[in-house]
Image (cartoon, coloured by chain):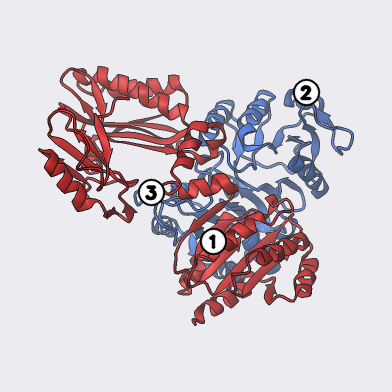
Amino acid sequence: MTIPEGVFVDGRTVADVALDGKGPWVVKAQVGVGGRGKAGGIGFAATHAEVVEFVRAHADGSIKGHRIAGFRVERKVDFVHEIYAGLMVDAAARAVRVMLSTQGGVDVEEHAADAMLSAVAAPDEASLVVAAEGLLAHVAPELREPLNAAFHALIDAFLRFDASLIEVNPLFVLADGSWVAGDMKLAIDENALPRQPEVERIVRSRPQAYRESLFKLEHDFDYVGLDTHGQIGLLTTGAGLSMMLIDEMRQASRRPFNFCDVRTGQLRGSPARLIEVLRQFTQGSDIAVVLVNVFAGITDLGEFAQLLLDALDAVPELGVPVVARLIGNNFEAARRTIEASGRAIVVESDLDKALQIAIERAGVTA
Amino acid sequence: MTPFHLDPTAKVLVQGATGRMGSRHATLMKRYGTNIVGGTAGASARRDDSDIPLFANCAEAVAATGAVASVTLVPPLDVLRAVTEALDAGIELIVSPSEGVPVRDAMTAYAMVKERGAHWIGPSTPGLAIPERMKLGFIPDVSLKPGSLGVMSKSGTLSYETCFRLASRGIGQSAWIGVGGDPVKGLRFAELLPYFQQDAATRAVLVLGEIGGSEEEDLAAEMTRLGFNKPVFVLLAGASAPEGVTMGHAGALIQGGRGTIQSKTRALRDAGAEVFTSIESLVEGAARRDV
């Protein structure tokens, strides 16, 4: 896909960078969030001096909470049409939605309802090409050739990288009938990373940009930091139940530190995952209590209790009380193991009671 | 497509029956009373210690046993192949518990399932069960109890916890179906509603939903369309999830202001459901209704 000629700069390099030829220039803040243009993240500059001015004014800024990583300085594209083109997974249709609007650009969302054409198709090249061609029948004849070429490129990338979304907005169509991707978003399916080595390489090369994807890649379970001032650390298994616990803590005006789903069924005798989560808690300044929750359908709680003790031993700097809600397979062995350790861990089999204890502990501030 | 139905005596195959998960759960399902008639295994699998008959592939297993349902206990990247093999062998109901199936594989599998008129549950689900009759997957025994509540859930653990508390208060289940936490799946909430409508053993329905997607809103529309007249109890997880962040389940994601708890709550309440905000309040609400 052709993108505008350009160069990456930041506040330090912008003055010395060589800009080929004449402007005008477009300066784009590099940030992983949509709506950048409306938030003031795109500048227009007639001269190199104006480029420097825009970059220096925004270099330490952020957009919608995302820090600006740098800027791309591009020669302004002389276009005839501004188009939106995209493909995304449509969960309700259980298929791919192919989308096209001839009113692309920063206002695409305002126009979406009346201007967006779309069709669903199975996730294979032939079906997607047919769907795209169906949409192109509704646009002006001079747009069909460039947009047909664009859709072939988008379909290829969508399938080749196991994307869940790919969109080009604006997609510039030039007077000579060629097209240029003015900006692009690609969302990848984390579940497909095992067969996408190139995508995995990109995730690994930019740990700050893809923190949660990288965590899952390296540790093979889900962890999301929610609140750096959170009071309750969750060492829990199960996505839905962990989400519900977070909701109930917030209802009680407490601040959960994190979401996690350690998947106790996959620990395979190693405390590594538990240690990883406890280490995250040491970063929290306000953590007052750790809530453990394991509903053991199959997991042996006796084994789990030992792994929990091993993990706590491995992170001695985490000096906060632990409330362990354990229920199910081999509960009594777990209780005995924890009692024998002499550690001040509250063992409780009723989740609501365990949650109340954690909520009370979190309410006690030093 | 024949309407979705559950036959507690259906003959069931386990695909991937010699793997670590497969052999363990094949035994547990059989012990629970499920009519497990065989399993499939890779060519190099050990066969001598299996307590179910093993076959090289689904076609041979179906020819020998007459199986009509299967559980695919295979790694996530092998699920598409397993579903394809089951469909080619004529299997009518496929349950896929695996977490981490690529979304493109799920879309491809669904297109085939639909074309064959079969039914697919999952992926990313503990499966389904009729208490004390059959279990396809690994819903824990301690939460299963015969009763009159039809359960459908996106989350395994939230359903274990909620049904465990309900069961301890004497409220059991007529059938329990985990639709799974992935965005693209086989059967969705709305498509299971006609089953609970016609099922005489179901006197009320429990729905455990999550933020993200439109499944709960679509369920509300289907309740209205069917004139669904049994009580519907709903709990929705993820009210405090930040926009644009995935909470474990790939489907539990709010983007562009869509799929919020507010949208789902409003739609379901308008359709006549009772929507609760905590597990305990739901359990008490259901207990009061004496279902």
Name the N-terminal-most of marks 2 and 3: 2
Closer to the observer: label 1 or label 2? 1
Q: Amino acid at mark 2?
A: Glu
* Mark carried by residue B255: 3
Q: Which chain is blue?
A: B
Question: Residue at (71%, 49%) from the top-left corner?
Answer: B138
Q: Mark 1 vs mark 2: tell me if same chain.
A: no
Q: Is residue B184 above or below residue A120?
A: below
**Whether residue B48 is situated above or below residue B32 in the rendered picture:** above
What type is the residue that disc 3 sits on? Gln
Image quarter of the C terminus of chain B: bottom right
Query: Label 2: which residue?
Result: B60
Label 2, label 3: how many angstroms apart (C-alpha)?
46 Å
Q: In the shown orientation, is residue A318 left or right of residue B74?
A: left
Asked if badges 3 and 1 are on one and the same chain, I answer no
- The red one among the chains is A
Which mark lies nearer to you, 2 or 3?
3
- Residue B241 spot, x, y in % from top left: 44, 58
Q: Chain of mark 3?
A: B
